[in-house]
Image: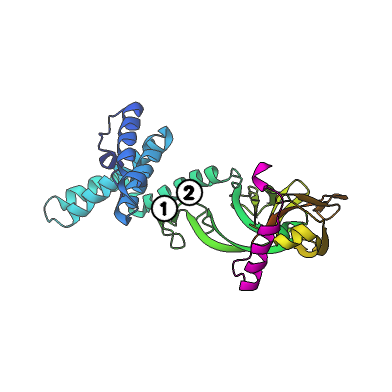
């Protein structure tokens, strides 16, 4: 059955091209998937409106369509007369004269096929232009030690791309694409192996070429950019290539001095505590910081004098004796 595109757009055969355009815009806004939704009825209606406009807005296609409607009308009338007894012989004579010009008896014009071929050609022209995929940005968090030593991480990223079945057109052979359910896009998880180099700085970006959104019609894929976030630990913090650490010592060690062991990002070190070390005093360990581009930083230790929580009676007695024999008033400093 031949579709009535004039009826679909709600216009008459005498409408001008401007009036056809206005009618199309009004209906397209009303039935656009963003407004009417993605139901099958709404999508079919929107597709039908676009088909009607593609034919009626083109002068040549509209003339061909009008001729096809005329032939279709003749065929319908012929069918009606063949089912009626009256005027049959009269019609046959008049029609036989016409069919010698139109060859109507053998006429097999398939307008549905014509519409599909023309709209398909139009769609092919539209999709031939290559469209590059968009870049994708994400973040990954690593520890401070991982940033110094380097590490390999695997990330699982949810990606959205153009549907490979319908190339984003939402329809396949006039029906809703079964692969993307008429959305024109697909979403899936993809795993990436990311090699993070040693000595990387906070907020540095790693680029994975062509791992972004997929290009359409031969367009280039976008890139994947991974921003590296270095998690600052309570034990350490960094400033440039230098590493800072707070080390607790006992009051006796601060007064008498001695040697302690500390764990750093590069291993264990023995540190000498000078006698009469004050709380908050800093000790620099040269060359024990971050190594990067043939440069190395230092490690700066801040001494924190801490009193043990569980003192024995004997220890408390010694502190009382020390208080009695002490000759200095600390509050005078």
Q: List x then y, in percent, for residue 226.
A: 65, 52
First-in-chain label (2 vs 1): 1
Rate crowding at label 1 as few (under 14), some (14 to 19) or many (20 or more) other CA atoms within 10 Å: few
- Name the residue tied to disc 2: 120
Q: Which residue corresponds to the image point at 35% horizontal and 26% vertical from the top-left? A: 18
295 with respect to 39 (left or right): right
Any magenta on residue 321? yes
Residue 287 magenta-highlighted: no
- Residue, x 28% and y 44% (percent of image)? 4
Left-right relation of 138 to 166: right
Looking at the image, the residue that sits furthest to the left is: 86
Magenta-highlighted stretch: main secondary structure?
Answer: helix
Bounds of the magenta span? 308-333
Q: Which residue is mark 1?
A: 113
Q: Residue furthest right?
A: 294
Query: Which residue is more in the foreground, 91 or 24?
Result: 24
Which quadrant of the rendered structure holds the C terminus? top right
Tell which of 6 and 63 is nearer to you. 6
Q: Is residue 102 left or right of residue 167?
A: left
Name the element at disc 1. helix
Coordinates of residue 164 in the picture (x, y in percent): 54, 58
Q: Is residue 141 depicted above or below 31 in this figure?
A: below
How far from the left and from the top, in percent, is residue 85?
Answer: 12, 56
Looking at the image, how many numbered discs can be counted on the residues?
2
Q: What element does badge 2 sit on?
A: helix
């Amino acid at each position: 059955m031949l579709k009535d595109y004039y009826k679909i757009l709600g216009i008459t055969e005498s409408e001008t091209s401007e009036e056809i355009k206005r009618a199309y815009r009004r209906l397209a806004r009303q039935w656009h998937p963003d407004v009417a939704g993605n139901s099958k009825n709404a999508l079919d209606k929107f597709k039908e409106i676009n088909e009607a406009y593609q034919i009626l807005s083109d002068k040549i296609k509209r003339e061909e369509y009008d001729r096809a409607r005329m032939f279709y009308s003749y065929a319908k009338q012929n069918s009606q007369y063949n089912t009626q007894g009256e005027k049959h012989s009269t019609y046959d004579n008049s029609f036989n004269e016409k069919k010698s010009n139109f060859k109507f008896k053998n006429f097999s014009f398939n307008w549905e096929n014509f519409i599909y071929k023309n709209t398909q050609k139009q769609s092919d022209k539209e999709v031939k232009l290559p469209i590059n995929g968009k870049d994708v940005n994400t973040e990954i968090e690593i520890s401070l030690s991982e940033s110094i030593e380097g590490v390999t991480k695997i990330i699982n990223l949810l990606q959205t791309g153009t549907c490979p079945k319908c190339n984003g057109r939402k329809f396949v052979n006039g029906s809703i694409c079964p692969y993307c359910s008429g959305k024109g896009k697909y979403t899936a998880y993809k795993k990436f192996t990311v090699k993070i180099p040693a000595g990387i700085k906070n907020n540095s970006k790693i680029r994975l070429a062509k791992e972004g959104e997929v290009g359409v019609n031969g367009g280039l894929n976008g890139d994947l950019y991974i921003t590296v976030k270095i998690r600052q630990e309570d034990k350490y913090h960094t400033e440039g290539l230098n590493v800072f650490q707070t080390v607790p010592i006992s009051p006796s060690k601060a007064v008498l001095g001695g040697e302690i062991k500390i764990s750093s990002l590069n291993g264990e070190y023995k540190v000498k505590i000078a006698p009469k070390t004050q709380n908050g005093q800093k000790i620099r360990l040269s060359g024990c910081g971050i190594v990067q581009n043939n440069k190395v930083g230092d490690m700066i230790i801040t001494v924190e004098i801490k009193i043990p929580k569980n003192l024995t009676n004997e220890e408390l007695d010694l502190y009382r004796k020390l208080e009695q024999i002490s000759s200095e008033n600390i509050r005078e400093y």
